[in-house]
């Protein structure tokens, strides 16, 4: 009696891990170590000056239930790096289990990291969990962004149901300075439709800046965000933080706010090159 291979063999799953270590040498940030395994790849476009720019690539082209990706970036003392992704990460329908992405960022004294991935696009009936762990040394700075679009209205796609979990933990000098857990599901569209949540908007973003200069950007950040979210600023230990939340009716409208906001907060480094393509 013959059996279908699909009924015997488990589905192939994505597994990838990549790690980048950079350090300041002779006044420039330079690559020290690069490790890549599975579907996780890192490429570095040529840049004339700091920050070093790295592009994360998932060669699998998206994630579904059971897939696992890990990214680690270590920025040495006095070094500076901007991290982005080659494209939007797509989270597809999950037949079982959930897709997971784990991110670990470490920044040495007087170092700086800008974590600026392109949007995560969530499809209907998907299941996804992401963790972002950041450890900053004294006088280190970070600009962190995660943007998520629940469905693609232009393609007639809507993420009505699913499970999504985003967990952030940011520490400086060993002390927790920011923590949050964003969970939505199983009724994604119904929850986003509530006026106290997103009022029907399907594109959302969180931007966090940890820097002694953070409070100085509050008013211009609020001007850029307009009525599509808000921002606040606080003192934390010997530094400060600015936290912004944005929402929009679709990914295009969200990016129209994110682009000038990132340009403002990222200073002379501006946007990652791939954002303007």
Image (spheres, rainbow, N blue to C red):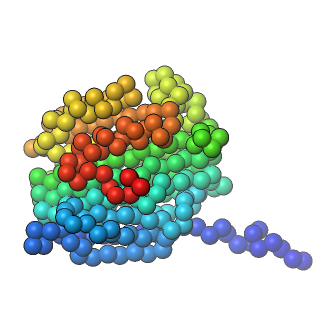
Query: Residue at (66%, 67%) from the top-left corner?
Result: 11
Instruction: Using the rendered view, name the quadrant where residue 256 is placed.
Output: top left
Q: How many marks?
A: 0
Location of residue 17 by image quarter? bottom left
Measuring from the top left, give residue 252's x and y in whole percent: 47, 40
Q: Is residue 134 visible?
A: no
Quarter placement of the C terminus: bottom left
Q: Residue at x 28, y 37 (%)?
A: 243
| In this picture, residue 27 sits left or right of residue 266 | left
Is residue 13 visible from the viewing direction of this image? yes
Q: In this view, which residue lies farthest toward the top?
A: 195
Camera-side residue of 254 and 104: 254
Q: Is residue 175 above or below residue 261?
A: below
Residue 212, quarter of picture? top left
8 and 148: which is toward the camera: 148
- Classify 156 as above or below 104: above
Instruction: Tell me where residue 171 appears, x and y as whole percent.
Output: 22, 50
Q: Is residue 262 left or right of residue 183?
A: left
Residue 127 in percent (x, y) is at 56, 50
Q: Residue at x 60, y 41 (%)?
A: 154
Residue found at the very far right of the displayed protein: 1
User: What is the quadrant of the N terminus in the image?
Assistant: bottom right
Image position of 86 with respect to 22: above or below? above
Q: Position of residue 16 (x, y in %)?
A: 46, 69
């Amino acid at each position: 009696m013959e059996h279908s291979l699909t009924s015997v063999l488990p589905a192939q799953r994505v597994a990838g891990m990549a790690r980048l270590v950079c350090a300041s040498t002779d006044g420039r940030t330079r690559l020290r170590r690069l490790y890549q395994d599975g579907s996780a790849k890192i490429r570095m476009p040529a840049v004339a000056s700091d920050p070093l720019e790295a592009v994360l690539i998932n060669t699998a082209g998206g994630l579904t239930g059971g897939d696992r990706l890990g990214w680690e970036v270590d920025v040495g003392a006095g070094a500076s790096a901007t991290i982005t992704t080659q494209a939007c990460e797509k989270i597809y329908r999950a037949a079982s289990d959930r897709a997971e992405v784990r991110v670990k960022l470490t920044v040495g004294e007087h170092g700086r990291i800008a974590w600026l991935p392109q949007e995560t696009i969530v499809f209907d009936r998907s299941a996804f969990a992401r963790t972002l762990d950041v450890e900053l040394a004294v006088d280190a700075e970070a600009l962190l962004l995660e943007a998520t679009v629940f469905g693609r209205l232009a393609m007639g796609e809507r993420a009505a149901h699913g499970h999504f979990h985003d967990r952030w933990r940011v520490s400086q000098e060993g002390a927790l300075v920011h923590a949050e857990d964003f969970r939505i599901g199983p009724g994604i569209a119904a929850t986003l439709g509530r006026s106290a949540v997103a009022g029907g908007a399907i594109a959302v973003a969180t931007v966090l800046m940890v820097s002694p200069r953070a409070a100085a950007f509050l008013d211009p950040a609020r001007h850029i965000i307009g009525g599509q979210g808000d921002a606040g600023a606080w003192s934390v230990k010997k530094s400060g933080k600015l936290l912004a939340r944005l929402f929009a009716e679709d990914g295009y409208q969200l990016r129209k706010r994110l682009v000038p906001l990132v340009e403002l907060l990222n200073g002379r480094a501006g946007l990652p090159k791939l954002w303007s393509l």
